[in-house]
Amino acid sequence: MKGLLNHASVIISLILAALYALGLMYHLSFLKTFGIEETQFPLSIDRIFYQGFFAFANLTAPNISFVLLCASGVLITAYLAILVIEIAKRSNFVEPAFSKLRNAFNKEPNKIELHPALEDFAEFSAKVFWYVCAGVFFYLSVILVLIAAEHVGKENAEQYMEKIKNNQVAVDELLVEVNKGVVEKYTGYSIACNSHQCAYFDGVTSSVFNHNAVKSLQSKPVQ
């Protein structure tokens, strides 16, 4: 327990990094499906977490479980990489092979005197190879988990579009000031909002409006 508390800051940092990465990938994929560039619609950190993990009211239970599995996968793969490195460090896999090779060259008529520095360098090179393999495994595992989270974001956006087609989403009617003194009516469905603007989808195209440009907003509940 004491050891766990000593590493609590590291564990919490890994968990937060995993949640942020998955939430960001979900956010990117969700907005991209609607044709919105994420850099034009930034969200706060807490909003990214919300978009990634708590805005799944319309998702089925298997999809929610899948996203939670992705979130835990980042942490698990990190510890697997650490485990592989520790095993390679404490259990010298390459020593038996080098011992056999050394014995083969120490017997007549193939006896060869190898410099100890050369033998040490060969063993060190083999250990470096194992460390690189562990790093590549960790990198690929994280990439696969993030791709899975991106897939969930796209799937959620497509389900939202399907609900719009089936009239299962409340429609918003806005009066938007497009130019100074020029106000136009806009009808669409809310996608996401941040502290400065909101994104809407009218069934064909997506639009982003600043809050100060919206003069009024009315929402029609789902019948």
Image: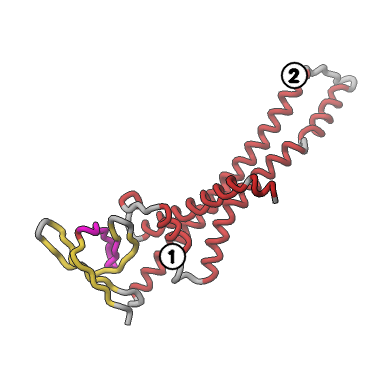
Q: Is residue 204 magenta?
A: yes
* Residue 208, above or below 127: below
Left or right position of 69 against 161:
right
Binning the other alpha carbons within 10 Å of mark 1 as few (below 14), some (14 to 19) or many (20 upward) gives few
Front-most of 133 and 72? 72
Residue type of the residue flagged with mark 2? Ala
The disc label shown at residue 117, or none: 2
> Which residue position is annotated with label 1?
55
Q: Pinpoint residue 139: horizontal percent, then vertical percent.
A: 56, 44
Rendered residue at 62%/52% (across/down): 76
Q: Pinpoint residue 131: horizontal percent, then vertical percent.
A: 65, 36
The disc label shown at residue 125, or none: none
Residue type of the residue flagged with mark 1? Ala
Q: Pinpoint residue 112: horizontal percent, then vertical percent.
A: 83, 18
Q: CA distance from mark 2 to mark 1?
A: 60 Å
- Magenta span of residues: 199-212
Q: Can you tell which quarter of the image residue 66 is in?
A: bottom right
Rendered residue at 87%/22% (across/down): 106
Rendered residue at 83%/29% (across/down): 99
How many numbered marks, from 0 up?
Answer: 2
